Every structure is written in structure tokens, then in C-alpha cells.
Image (cartoon, coloured by chain):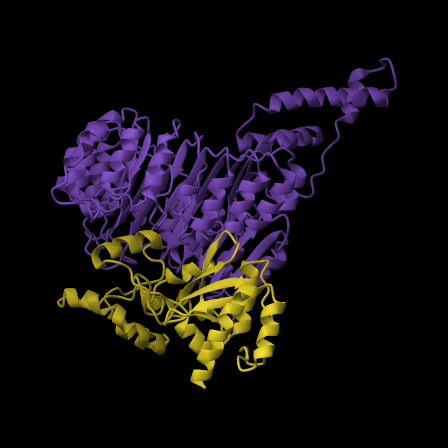
Amino acid sequence: MANMLGTELCLGLPGGGGGNEVDSSPRTTGKRGFSDTVDLKLNLRAKETDMDLNKNLDNGSEEKPVSAKDPAKPPAKAQMVGWPPVRSYRKNFMANKSTGEESEKASSVAFVKVSMDGAPYLRKVDLKMYKSYQELSDALAKMFSSFTMSNYGSQGMIDFMNESKLMDLLNSSDYVPSYEDKDGDWMLVGDVPWQMFVDSCKRLRIMKGLEAIGLAPRAMEKCKSRA
Amino acid sequence: MSEDDERQQCPPSDLEFVSNKARNCNATGSGSGHPELQSVYLDQVLENVLENVLHFLTSKRDRNAASLVCKSWYRVEALTRSELFIGNCYAVSPARATARFARVRALHLKGKPRFADFNLMPPDWGAHFNPWALAMAKAYPWLEKVNLKRMSVTDDDLATLAELFLGFKELVLVCCDGFGTSGLAIFVNKCRQLKVLDLIESEVSDDESDWISCFPEGESHLESLIFDCVECHINFEALERLVARSPLLKKLRLNRYVSIGQLYHLMIRAPQLTHLGTGSFSPSEIAGQGDQEPDYVNAFAACKSLVCLSGFREIIPDYLPAIYIVCANLTSLNFSYANITAEQLKPIISKCHKLQVFWVLDSICDEGLQAVAATCKELRELRVFPVDAREDSDGPVSEVGLQAISEGCRKLQSILYFCQRMTNTAVIAMSKNCPDLVVFRLCIMGRHRADHVTGEPMDDGFGAIVMNCKKLTRLAVSGLLTDKAFDYIGRHGKLVRTLSVAFSGDSDMALKYVLEGCPQLQKLEIRDSPFGDAALRSGLHHYYSMRFLWMSSCRLTRHGCQEIARAMPRLVVEVIRSADEEEMDDAVEILYMYRSLVGPRTDTPKFVTIL
């Protein structure tokens, strides 16, 4: 659940905050020379010579709405992280009132719901947090302690071509993860390369292996048609 | 085991006390029986008496003092302490706490430092409630109340509280995170004696679980249900049924997904409410145009005990007149999510003669504050939040508003004021007009901003505050400040316990003045100020008396912090980086250090190094 905090942090210029957009982590500005902050009238651009220029380019859009409002004013200063000291909830609340519903930046998070048959809680995971099926499996194991995913092949994918291997897998494990893909079909997790999975997975359901057998033929069919 | 235990200068060694046995032996003299046995018997009697007496001691400071008298008093105090307050969850371990105190009914724990609220620290820093929950489950099966602030609480923890503590009654979570509505669902379902569920400014993830429906059927014991921070839709019909079967409900604070029409239905079922959070205070979108509007005035009129009003999360000011009728009795009004003008405020505030606590947005401008000053003579606490929390936004409130408040609200004790412009004159006026000030937090949003009339630093204003407000314990400074301001604080701020500093000061001297001058200083949080290792060293005599020191984006180096760590073994010195940064150079981005009885914690994330 702590992952949810990721949506709260703001993109901004180095040391920037203040907007609604999703960020990876707060950028504090310890490395900047302290004397730079003294003269308020300095144009922001001039101050940034010793900052990370990449971040500048990424986040330049943060400034535009402000200067567009009042072209007579000099361009807005970089919004510092955590300044003024107003809690994010309040900052976002006030900002949302003017801009409408907060929209998640699709590219940086991929939250999907995870349910496990028999478990009382529903969870959400951000698939972008993981780089492989193994990492996802470890995370799910932590969340649902009675769930242990069986080992996947070297690439982390199930070999759907081999029917007997598949049947072994489904018979041997108590629980197997399945997912709903973009087409609305329920598939067994592990049928496609990891990145493709992240892009097409809409939600996850951890089901009993025996139930998942019903999915297997469809999974194999889809696999064959792709091959 | 609270922080106040460690008010003496040296760290508490593992408690060696003079036994009072010798004293007892002398007292009995040459009486009958073996002197050893007799003294043991007398010890027992004394302890029983003491136990009965100490039951009446509630203040934690008094209890800490009592526990230091002698071993006997220490033991008895530990047996009779029922409310355990721990100001820093890492200052002591669950094991130590449960070993010392045997019969705890209420636990109050605080976790992350306050600056974590402003995204200055990467998430997942720590302050997990889990080890505490598990330890409490074993040691205190009769635990009834838990109050957590800035802790990470999981759904499993909520389940633990509900399932393993049969008499659990009160849960208060302030600024917490890590759990969701599914955890709430289990909690409310299993916790059959629940009286209080207060979720305040916490982050609750939307697991799409209908937790309101999970309260068990039948009459409920609920006295307080606060969920205004929960950003999820709720099942209104279930809520209405719940309120209808909660005859003891006094406090109800709804979230913004409750429309004003729905609010009406709840209010007529619960006229006994004393604290009400109104939810959105606007109609839902699906309400038909021709629908008969309920009689909101009537609903408010029925709530004769209402003293505290908040909410107004998506306010349509046209509905405000409905609350006129309760204004005369209100002691607390929170408009801090209501973007209203001075004109919209005036008809309400002019009726609030008894108001003591007022939270509002700066949208009311100086004119609105003047209206507050004209009527609210009993005002004790004022908080003015910015609609537009950016450095260079327009500032609708200024020194004019502050001056007006100081002249009208002489009993003011606590103020939090966000503004873009300020003058020393107004701050000095407040220091003289409001001698009862205990908390003074002024946030001039533009960094390094001087007195906008004279162009001078704000030193004299804050100086006057520490000089004239003799009861001041909490201070937050801002604006252009030189070392002189800190000299004043060190000289006059003798009762100051909490100090927040940002973008202030010229040199190490500033921090030295404070560390050397303020004996009561407990919590010091500093950001973006030019203080270095030399300044840090000047506090060595004092750090064991403090709860914590936070310094971010200052001029500290790793070897400077290491020196402190070496000199003070009972201090935990954490160096915190931004999550994605590699350990590169000697500069310290964030220093967070605190005294601890149990040494470095074992749950540090990758971006934290303990020196």
C-alpha cells in the first residue's frame, strides 16, 4: 500500500514540487549552491546552471501554465519540494478543484487490482514496480502469504506449447495467477514476455490451480495463434 | 517509556535505584520476627498502598517523575501505568516497553518526523506499526485504545487489532498510511466493542471494499466516526442504517462523497451530534432539477448540541445560510476546504461569538480576517491556509489581517498563518496584544522575503514574539532572517520546545544560539539553511534531552555527523538520501537523529544509513 504514495509526489523542476502529476521520488536540492537562493529576482533559468539539465527538459511543462496566466510577470521560480509546508492532501485538493479530476500519468504507473480466491482483501499492485515475473511472484507471495507461485522457466514464461508440462504445473500448485487482458479474456500469467504482460494486464486473479485448468486450452490456443 | 523519561542530561542507564529496604529495616527497629521477613512484608504493604495511590496519577510527566523516586516506586508505577505514550517509535523497542509496563490499556505512538508530510523524505522510511501490534497482542490482550501518528499501518495490522484484542474500543489514526478500505472492512466487522474510529488526514487506499456495510448488525456502540480523509465512495444506505442504530454517536465527519442531500438524511437521524463534518456540502450531480430541496435549516436547528463544524469540501455557498442557526453555539469551525470570499463569510462569522477554534482559507482576504477579529473575542486558535500554495502566487492575506486579529482576538493562544507579505510591525503588535500565545507559526511563502514595507529582515518581529510571549512553546519562522533572529530566540525563548526553521540564518552562529540558549528544546526541524558541522557540534550537550533533530539541505558533511555519532552512543544518527541517489560524496542531504534506548533500528530501507 505504501506504493500508493508514489502517485502523490509531484513532478517538478529539480527540487520542484507543487503540481498534481505523478513522480518517482522527491528531488531535494542539497547539491545546489546555497547562495543561489538569496536573490529572489533572479530568473529561474540563470540559477539552474548547476542543476541536472535532464530533469529540466523533462519537467519544463510544469512552468508553462503559470507564466501563461500573466505574461507580464517574470517566469515562475522553481517550486521547491515541500515548500510552502502544506500537506500534499491539501495541496492536491485545492489544485483539483480548479483542474477537475486528477488523472494518473499512464506511463509511469500501472496499478491493477489483485484478488485471491478465498482471501478477504483485494489489493492493488503497480506492475511497473517489477521487472520480471519472479519479482511479481515474490511480491504477491508477501501480500498473500498462503500463495506460492511455482517456478517459471528460464525466461519466466510458461511453455504453453507443451501440454503435459502445463498440466503438471496446474496440478502441482495450489494457486495459479491469472489475469484479464486487454481483450477481456482471462489468461494464465506467464504466457507472454514480461513487458507485453505489463501493457496488457488489466487485473489479476489468483485462483486454485485446478480451476485454472479451464483456462489452459484457451491460453494454448491464443499462444498457437500468435506463434 | 516516554520521551520525558530522558529529561535529564545524561542518557538513562539501565535504571539503578537505591533500594528502600535499608530504610524499612531501620523503621521497624527491633520489632517481632525476623527483620528480613518483616521488611519484605512492609515493602509489600507499601507497594499495595502505592499502587492504589498511583492509580490516580494520570499525567505522563507526573508518572515519569514518580518512577524515578526509587525502585519500589518505579515498579509500582510501571504496574499502574495504563496509558503509554511513546513520542518516537524508534526510541524504544516493543519488547522493552512491554517488559516494563504490564497493564497497558491505551497506546499512543508517533512515528515519522513532521517534515515527512512535505515529501522531504522518500516513502517507506519506516515507522511500521506491525512489530508493535504483534508485541501488544502478546503482552496486552486487554488493550482498548490505539492512537497512531505518522505511522505505517497495514491491513494486516488492522485485522490484528480487531481479532486479537477482544475489548478493543478506540482507534485513532492521524497522518498514517499503508492501509486500505479492505483493512477497514475487516477491522469494523470484527471489532464488536468499537466506540471510536477516527481517520484523520490519513491516506487510505481504495480497494473498492464496502467497509461501511461491514459494521455488524444490531445496536452499535459507536460514539465517533471520522472518515473525512477517505477518498473513496461509500455505501450511503449502509451508512444511514449505521447512524440510525448508533444512539451514542456524537462525532461524525463525512467525506466529500456524501452530498448535502444525504447529509440531511443523516442529520435528522442523529440530532444528538456534537461534532459534524458535512462532507461535500453540495448536491450530488444526479439530483433532479425539480426535486424538492430538503429543509436544511430544520436539520441544523434540530442539532442543538452541535459545537464543532467542519467539512464543506465542495461547498456551494448558496447553502451556507442553513448553518446560521448553529453559529451561536459553535466553538470550532473548520472552513479550510471552503473557497469562500469575505462577503460569504461575514454573515456566518458575525454570529460566532463563542468561537474558539477557526480554520480557514486565505480566500477570505484581510477583510474576512477583520470580520473574524470583530466578533470572535474568545478565539484561541486560528489557522489560515493558502488556496494557492506556491511561492509566487497572489497573497490575499497580509500584515493587515494579522494586525486585525491581534487587536480583536486578545485571548489567542495558537496561530498558523500563511501569507505572501508581512511586516515586523504587525508581528510585534501581535506579540504585545496576544500575550497568551503558546504557538506562533508564521509562513511567509516567498523564501527570504523581507518586511515588504521597510525592506528589513523579519528579525525584530520574531524577536518580539519570543520576548513578549512568555508562554511560547512552539515557534515556526520564515521570511528573511539573519543570525540576529536566532540570537533573540536563544536569549528569550526559554520555554520553546518545538522550533521549525526554513531558508533562514546567515551562519553557524544562528544554530549555536538556539542550541545553547533553549534548554527546553525537544524538536528541532531545519531545512535549507546554511548550518554546518561546527553548528551541529555545539549541541552535543543537549541532544540527549531532545526527541529529535532534523536537518535537510543544510551544510552538513558525513564526517561531521559521524563525529556526533561517535560522541553520543545513545543517539541514532540517520543519514537519508533521495531514493534514487547513490551514495556519492560527503555532503549529507538529510540528517535525522534521535535518542534511543535500543540503538539503531533493524528495518532501515536502502536509502538510509545509520552512522
**Residue B323 on image: x %, y %:** 20, 32
Q: Quadrant of the C terminus of chain B?
A: bottom right
In the displayed structure, B275 sits above or below A151; it is: above
At x 61%, y 42%, the residue is: B137
What residue do we see at 59% from left, 53% from top? B571
Instruction: Locate residue B502, reporting x and y percent.
Output: 37, 55
Q: Residue furthest right?
A: B34
Residue B39 figure quarter: top right
Can residue B28 be seen here? The reply is yes
Q: Residue at x 56, y 79 (%)?
A: A163
Q: In the image, A42: left or right of B565?
A: left
User: Exactly how many numbered labels are in the figure?
Assistant: 0
Please tell me whether residue B555 is drawn above or below residue B102 in the rendered image.
Answer: below
Q: Residue at horizontal 35%, vertical 65%? A: A22
Chain B: drawing colour:
purple
Counting from the top left corner in percent of width and height, residue A35 is at 35, 67
For the N terminus of chain B, the image quarter is top right
Farthest residue in the top direction?
Answer: B32
Write down the colour of chain A. Answer: yellow
Q: What is the quadrant of residue A148 in the picture? A: bottom right
One can see residue B324 in this view: no
Is residue A143 found left or right of A125 in the rendered image?
Answer: right
Relative placement, left or right, of B541 versus A8 is right
Q: Is residue A52 above or below residue B370?
A: below
Where's residue B215, x and y in %?
A: 44, 39
B151 with respect to A89 (left or right): right
